[in-house]
Amino acid sequence: MALLQISEPGQSPQPHQRKHAVGIDLGTTNSLVATVRSGMAEVLKDEQGRELLPSVVHYMTDGVSCVGHEASEHNIADPLNTISSVKRLLGRGLADVKTFGGQLPYEFDSDDGGMPKIKTAAGLISPIQVSAEILRKLAGRAEIAFDSMLDGAVITVPAYFDDAQRQATKDAATLAGIKVLRLLNEPTAAAIAYGLDESTDNNSSEESTIAVYDLGGGTFDVSILRLTRGVFEVLATGGDSALGGDDFDRAIAEWLRQEMGMAEDLNPIEQRILLETARAAKEELSDSDQVALEVLDWRGTLTRELMHSLIDGLIDKTLRACKRSLRDAGLEKTQISKVILVGGSTRTPRVGEKVAELFGTEPLCSLNPDQVVAMGAALQAEVLVGNKSGDDMLLLDVIPLSLGIETMGGLIEKIIHRNTTIPVSKAQEFTTFKDGQTAMAVHVLQGERELATDCRSLARFELRGIPPMVAGAAKIRVAYQVDADGLLNVSARELTSNVESRIEVKPSYGLGEEEITSMLQDSFSHARDDMQARALREQQVEADRMIEDLLAALDKDAEALLDAQESQCLHVAINELKQVRASSTEHRVLARQIESVAKASEEFAARRMDASIKSALAGHTLDEIEKG
Amino acid sequence: MAITMTPAAEQHVVKHLEHRAKGVGIRLGVRTTGCSGLSYVLEFVDDATTGDEVFQCGDVKLIIDPKSLLYLDGTQLDYVKEGLNEGFEFKNPNVKDECGCGESFHV
């Protein structure tokens, strides 16, 4: 029996036409799935009534043994085959994983293309496969709840996720058989759950600035968003990938250990008892002023005030990250109009108090902070799947870093600038650099710096089969297309012959999370250097071109058109230019040298011109030429 | 002629109306469509149209157009949970046959 939901007036679906869409919060520690019922976002529970699914998968020799709560139970007995926190590895290169994978107990290996895989009893497993298991479990929960197939899902990702990490998330969904309607930034999802996208009039140019403070069990993220006419733009992100509510528990447990006079090297069972006591005490102190503790044969009390003194240092760390993000966004804290609390650890009232104090405004926390991201994703999924008409609700996102192409001399030409709303498609024409050039390498880059080596390489491909033409005659149109998920398609087409080559960016994995923010900062702090470097490279390209052209010309015509001394002079000039090209770091010096070679070769160029006209005219009558 | 609602259904309708923050009640109706001839309509109502029948059910107004009422007379709207699935169900004594999924029916 199909059960009904209440629709908006005039929008009752046809029988069998209702689409089932969900929002999925694929978290580091826990994941959730939510849907919209009768206009309200609700988190779906499992058979046992639990909302959170631990993001943990346990493997055995014959494959996946279990996912979620059951998998967590293997954590202590079989840590190498119990995979958790896989989100930290998603879309990362082997090198990244080796540097910070030390915090994780797994052994890594790579069989192809540098994608790291985890050694388990079931063989080598990629982070994408692990994520797919978690997604499959959540989708299964939804399909039972709907008693129907799933039509699509919106999956949330951290705002700082780069192309590789987003692509990996999408790959995981595809592997799990889920149609991804869109990837949505987590802070944006939280803002949607609070209805902030609807609170500003879409037609006015009114702007609001939102800070999303997301303190989970093991990670802290802060994002500064700007909302203009229904479009969210990420102005800055920051945080600490190794700071969360679990650290509060550890701080309290450490206090307990000292009070109880226990040695520092606790065995795992003692550790667990202390941590569980600490967590229970923390939760109880949310409502009461003090809590009586009983651990083993020790008795004592913890007051709220004392707990504050234990955790304030940790909270202050998050506040410093907030201030940094504000600075990155170029905003004063008074310019933030709304603050949203996300993540289970914001239930500790002290966190809300200190956040309110920093921003000078009472944060929004009426929705369950564990669920708010999944709820926002569900609301967005409902719109995208087509259950709710009204295209005014179509939410847009922006690309975080500029996308460009490498041009001669290792420079980057930006094709799509950062903060452009997506989906977007832009094209630019390029040409060949050498006579008879039949192929062109397209190097796709991401970043704000001027030199290709300072930006992130996303992909390389070649356009072959360009008909041989003189340098500069071919017209090659390079088009960049970013879809609504922030994924990039690049195509290159030679316009006279229509040869085409394209690539879907399967980004070369491997960019540290802090690098993304630091890439942005670098572009500001290196602005002047970059400008210099660009100018120098441009002159170097010019010098190379001149040297090459001139040598080719000398090779061909020197004997006929120049006497020995003239020829000697030009060779000397070329050698000088070569030297300056190799040694000078000052673009003006190089430019002057180019100028002087150009002057020295003027006469030679004029003679060549004359000679080629003569040879073109030779053997023709004046009549023929005039008609021609 | 009458339409009723179980307490569970009333509780959910009240919750949804509060969340929506507007609307005078909910509309029950039938449409001639679907694989077995008729299907149910369940919608929020912002303005009742003239000619609609209104049944007060606790705090909630159930609004029905007279034509639909012929097919729905005696119906009780219920809210049920079946495992993880939950939603509204029309308990309609007039139904003679329905399609396998129950989304459409005939009388």
Image (cartoon, rainbow, N blue to C red):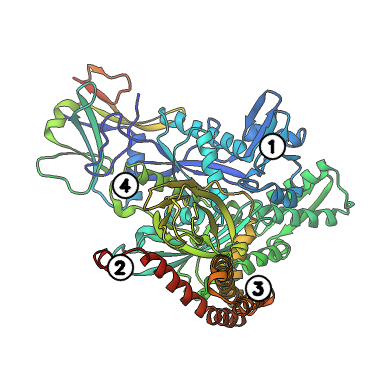
Q: What SS does tag 1 mark?
A: loop
Q: Which residue is the site of mark 3?
A: A578
Of residues A499 and A598, which is closer to you in this image? A598
Mark 4 — on which chain does it sit?
Answer: B
Residue A451 in the image: x percent, y percent? 59, 66
Residue at screen point 55% across, 33% down? A137
Q: Which residue is the site of mark 1?
A: A111
Asked if labels 4 and 3 share a chain, the reply is no
Residue at screen point 52% across, 49% down? A462
Residue A392 in the image: x percent, y percent? 30, 55
Residue at screen point 82% across, 44% down? A270
Q: Can residue A597 be seen here? A: yes
Residue A287 in the image: x percent, y percent? 60, 55
Density class for disc 4 (Cα within 10 Å; few <14, some 14-19, many ≥20) is many
Say what amino acid the circle numbered 4 marks.
Leu
* Marks 2 and 1 in Cβ contact (< 8 Å): no
Tell me the distance, in whole angstroms, between the alpha carbons under discs 4 and 1: 56 Å
